Image (cartoon, rainbow, N blue to C red):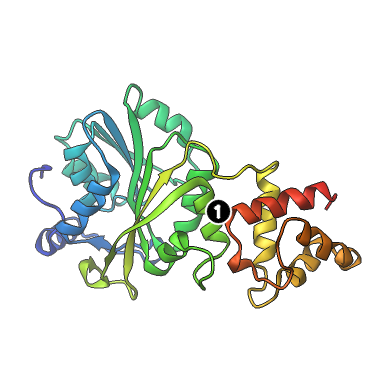
């Protein structure tokens, strides 16, 4: 098998599964995409060319890998399932720009891996169909480690993608929205029906493009404190900022919250879901200045 034969068709996928006696592991969230059009949209959103690299997480049997290899100078695909390593090795035996890395992305030193695999290239993007169960930990690792990435284009559960791209004021907007948008500009690329996978998941997916910011859009003194403040404001969504922050700073300091919030122009009766990134930054700075 070579990369000239399309992997992502129902027949080809079933043939590969049958040839290697592969069985899906629910615990790894394995769902193989069988729609060429969706794959083209994912790769197009990443803005790859022959001067750039692509880091893929969870390649499966290589449906997306194949499309990435046709567009990028170099593809490194990280696969945790040892049963898939020989399959990928066979499929990409003739592809000199594809490297399969066997390992758990959450445990790998990605800075070292990227330096080793993508030296000399003009940019690198993460492009992947991520397992639902581990989407957020993977994305937060990519962002918090401040890897030198241009874009992160991933297919994830539709409702999680909507939360990442949500604006203040809606029920989807939460601490995940703030965290992602602190590091990136988020854009929904397309909705992916559950019918274009083998096996079919129970819910629809979405492709989201996260353009990694060179600098955060707001200034914070302490990133860890900033994110703790955001999480505190969303601790109980139906509660007001005053109530959620009381639990954060302690009941003994409740009386100080009203004047503190007023000093930065935030009504204590508002809820966390109404605050912008700029307001969360101002709040965290004010709390630090007040000694909380």
Position of the N terminus by quadrant: top left
For label 1, the SS is helix
At x 47%, y 65%, the residue is 163
The image quadrant of residue 130 is bottom left
Count of marks placed on residues: 1
Tell me residue 28's x, y (percent): 39, 60
In the figure, is residue 168 to the left or right of 101? right
Residue 196 seen in the current view = yes
Residue 106 seen in the current view = no
Above or below, 48 relative to 156: above
Q: Residues within 10 Å of mark 1 (few under 14, many from 20)?
A: some
Above or below, 119 relative to 172: above
The image quadrant of residue 55 is top left
At x 45%, y 63%, the residue is 133
Tell me residue 177's x, y (percent): 51, 59
Tell me residue 91's x, y (percent): 17, 44
The image quadrant of residue 165 is bottom left
In the figure, is residue 29 to the left or right of 258? left
Above or below, 85 relative to 166: above
Q: Which residue is mark 1?
A: 179
The residue positioned farthest toward the bottom in the image shown: 238
Tell me residue 174's x, y (percent): 56, 65
- Please state which of residues 180 and 13 is positioned toward the viewer in this rendering: 180
């Amino acid at each position: 098998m070579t990369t000239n034969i399309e992997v992502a068709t129902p027949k080809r996928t079933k043939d590969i599964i049958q040839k290697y006696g592969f069985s899906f592991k629910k615990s790894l969230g394995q769902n193989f995409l069988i729609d060429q059009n969706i794959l083209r949209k994912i790769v197009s959103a990443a803005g790859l060319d022959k001067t750039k690299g692509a880091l893929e997480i969870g390649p499966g049997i290589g449906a997306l890998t194949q499309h990435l290899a046709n567009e990028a100078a170099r593809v490194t695909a990280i696969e945790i399932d040892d049963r898939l390593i020989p399959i990928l090795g066979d499929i990409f035996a003739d592809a000199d720009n594809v490297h399969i890395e066997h390992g758990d992305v959450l445990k790998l030193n990605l800075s070292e891996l990227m330096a080793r695999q993508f030296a000399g290239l003009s940019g690198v993007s993460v492009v992947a169909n991520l397992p639902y169960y581990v989407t957020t930990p993977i994305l937060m690792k990519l962002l918090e480690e401040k890897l030198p990435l241009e874009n992160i284009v991933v297919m994830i559960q539709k409702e999680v993608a909507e939360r990442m791209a949500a604006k203040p004021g809606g029920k989807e907007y939460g601490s995940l929205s703030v965290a992602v948008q602190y590091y990136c500009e988020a854009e929904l690329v397309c909705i992916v029906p559950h019918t274009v996978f083998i096996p079919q998941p129970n819910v629809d997916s979405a492709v989201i493009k996260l353009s990694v910011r060179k600098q955060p859009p707001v200034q914070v003194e302490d990133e860890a404190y900033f994110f703790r403040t955001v999480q505190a404001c969303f601790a109980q969504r139906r509660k007001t900022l005053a109530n959620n922050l009381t639990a954060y700073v302690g009941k003994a300091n409740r009386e100080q919250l009203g004047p503190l919030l007023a000093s930065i122009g935030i009504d204590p009766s508002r809820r966390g879901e109404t605050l912008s990134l700029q307001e969360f930054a101002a709040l965290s700075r004010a709390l630090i200045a007040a000694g909380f």
